[in-house]
Amino acid sequence: PEGRARSGGGAPPAITRRHKSFFTVEMPSGADGLGAATVASTITYPAKPPAGRHSGRLMEPSIWPRIAPIWPSSTHFPHPVDSLHEEDDTRLVDVEDGRTCAEPPTLDSHGFELCRSPCVATDLDDAAQLEAYLAQTARLVQRATRADLVVPFHHVRIDTARDRFGKRGGAVERVHGDYTAASGPQMLQELGECGVLPPRARTMRRGAILNVWRNVSSEAVRSKPLALCHVGSVAPDDVGVYYLVEGGEGRAERRMGMNLSLHYSPAHRWSYFPRMTRDEALVFYTYDGRADEPRFTFHAAFDPLPDTAPDAPPRVAMIVRCAALFE
């Protein structure tokens, strides 16, 4: 059966082995006196740009076609490319082991949730198995969100040994959110206009976009797991825009994607789920158009972990983006 993954009952053990200055500690977690294990590690935030500059970078032409469908196709970068500015603001933070929380994170409380969901596919290069996996993912999101309609619209497999989606390899280590308050609803509108969403989607009261992140390797994740920031710990002043701009020479216009950027605050609370397996899926909002206030879950790959070894296998993940709509 699929559902929330909890500690015990076969969940991977908490990590306790020490490695350099990265260590496991116990932190109090409220009046019940229970604690969640945390690991002190570095998280890479984007630094705030100087006046007149714009946070972002040019994307390699070979990478752009694989990520361009994430964003609305009608948006172009309105500034000179030499105005782009990228600078890391790397911070040492405590990242909570979500498996050891007294109250496991949920989509409603934190913006993300770990679900038990044995993968139905053994070969995602097979078209029939991929179709079955996307259908499984849609059902998982529908159960987790209670949405009336869920449609997967983009998927990508990222192998950290092969791909270069991030500056330093396949995993994106910069803290980001996939959509902004403008690009999220614009993407949903475009999906409706091009027929990916059925006509009835236009009349639904609330739209959202979620990512489903799954380890598709036969081995548990031991390097570059995903860290997620609790939505309730982010203040509006912490948030900016980060531009991913189509690279290549001699372009009069350059398509762009807009991420949200998150600037460091000591109030941020981070969680991760160590040693994720193929039988688990991490579901999180990248845009949630709630009537009271839109919500976004910031996330980033991070390293090292206390048990990361030089021979740790590459991280191979399948990310599926789903539109979820509510009557």
Image (cartoon, helix red, strand yellow):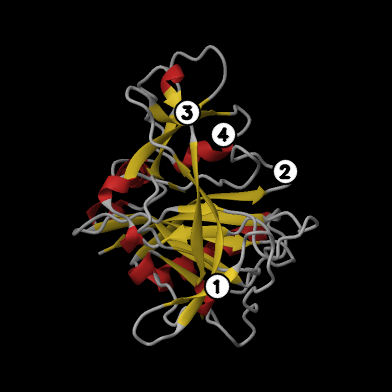
Residue 304 as seen in the image, left or right of residue 67: right
- At which x and y percent is residue 298? 42, 53
Task: Report the residue that reaches farthest toward the front.
Answer: 21
Per the image, the residue denoted by label 1 is 25
Instruction: Check disc 4 and report its element: helix, strand or loop.
Output: helix
Is residue 95 something that shows in the picture? yes
Q: How far apart are marks 4 and 1 (CA)?
A: 42 Å
- At which x and y percent is residue 73? 41, 33
Badge 2 or badge 3: first in the primary sequence: 2
Which of 113 and 84 lies nearest the eye of the viewer?
Answer: 84
Q: How far apart are marks 2 and 3 (CA)?
A: 22 Å
Q: Distance between the residues labelled 4 and 3?
A: 12 Å
Task: Report the residue that reaches farthest toward the right.
Answer: 311
In contact (CB < 8 Å): disc 4 and disc 1: no
Residue at 62% x, 74% y: name it: 118
Badge 4 or badge 1: first in the primary sequence: 1
Question: Which amino acid type is marked by label 4?
Answer: Pro
Depicted 291 relative to depicted 245: above or below: below
Q: How far apart are marks 2 and 1 (CA)?
A: 34 Å
- At which x and y percent is residue 126? 70, 56
Graded by Cα atoms within 10 Å as few (under 14), some (14 to 19) or many (20 or more), the crowding at tag 1 reads some
Give the mark toward the camera: 2 or 1.
Answer: 1
Q: How far apart are marks 1 and 3 (CA)?
A: 40 Å
Per the image, the residue denoted by label 2 is 162
Per the image, the residue denoted by label 3 is 245
Instruction: Check disc 1 and report its element: helix, strand or loop.
Output: strand
